[in-house]
Amino acid sequence: AQRVTQPEKLLSVFKGAPVELKCNYSYSGSPELFWYVQYSRQRLQLLLRHISRESIKGFTADLNKGETSFHLKKPFAQEEDSAMYYCALTGSSQGAQKLVFGQGTRLTINP
Amino acid sequence: GAGVSQSPSNKVTEKGKDVELRCDPISGHTALYWYRQRLGQGLEFLIYFQGNSAPDKSGLPSDRFSAERTGESVSTLTIQRTQQEDSAVYLCASSLAAGTGNEKLFFGSGTQLSVL
């Protein structure tokens, strides 16, 4: 079964400080992992996916299969990063389409 | 259309009534998903469609919940005999043709359902 755990419901950091949102997963196959973000009064949208190895808005995430983690990091937080962040998992095999989300972490960046 | 459209945006109903929630995916997106988000909770998978068929209905919480999709386009989620615990935001998302499961999901704004 697919499972995603985000241990922090709330995270608050000061502007300019590093931020790390934790995500751990459980999946027996080869996972595909994503971070989705929802800014205030906006729709849920894709932030980044591990397969693209991209950096979006200064955020990066590295898949660690040994620790079954996909933590989201940014070296210097900005106020506009305040949002709800969801880690999500699906399988890479054909037909494994269900995208399972974690409970989400509300990130607040203090000025 | 420009994005995934859901209607109504808000629905208030009385316990025991049936409700129908509608989702219009992005044109050309063959995969369509329904999620439920209760207050203060994460996204709970309900069902997904590939074309008009639903390979995975595992998230539907009870037989009061059903969904269909026609013309590889519009989908309706029906909740019969609503209960107070059905109160939540119901989110719809769509993505391009099924493949490795790596496709980006585009979400609608959701339907806020309140059961009194």
Image (cartoon, grey):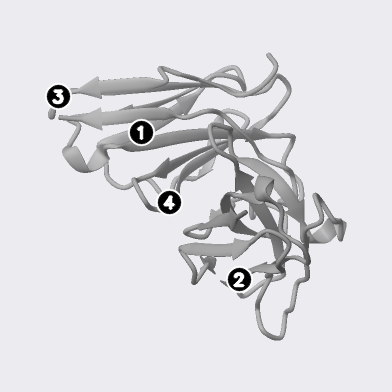
Residue type at mark 3: give it.
Answer: Glu
- Where residue A107 sits in the image (x, y, percent)? 56, 57
What distance separates the C-alpha of mark 4 from that of mark 3? 27 Å
**Secondary structure under the numbered disc 3 in the rendered image:** loop
Between disc 4 and disc 3, whose residue precedes? 3
Query: Which chain hosts label 2?
Result: A
Foreground mark, 1 or 2? 2
Q: CA distance from mark 4 to mark 2?
A: 27 Å
Q: Which mark is residue B14?
A: 3
Disc 1: which residue: B66
Residue shown at the point (85%, 56%) measured from the top left:
A55
Q: Is residue A26 visible?
A: no
Q: Quadrant of residue A30?
A: bottom right
Q: What is the count of numbered marks?
A: 4
The amino acid beneath tag 4 is: Ser
Examine the image and state in which quarter residue B14 appears.
Answer: top left
Please check whether the numbered discs 2 and 3 fall on a single chain: no
Could you tell me which quadrant the C terminus of chain A lies in? bottom right
Q: Which mark is residue A22?
A: 2
Please state if B14 lies on the left or on the right of B9 as rendered. Answer: left
- What is the CA distance from the residue labelled 1 to the residue labelled 4? 11 Å
> Residue A43: x, y in percent?
58, 34
Residue at (31, 29) in percent of width and height:
B113
Which of the two discs, 4 and 2, sits closer to the camera?
Answer: 2
Residue receiving disc 4: B58
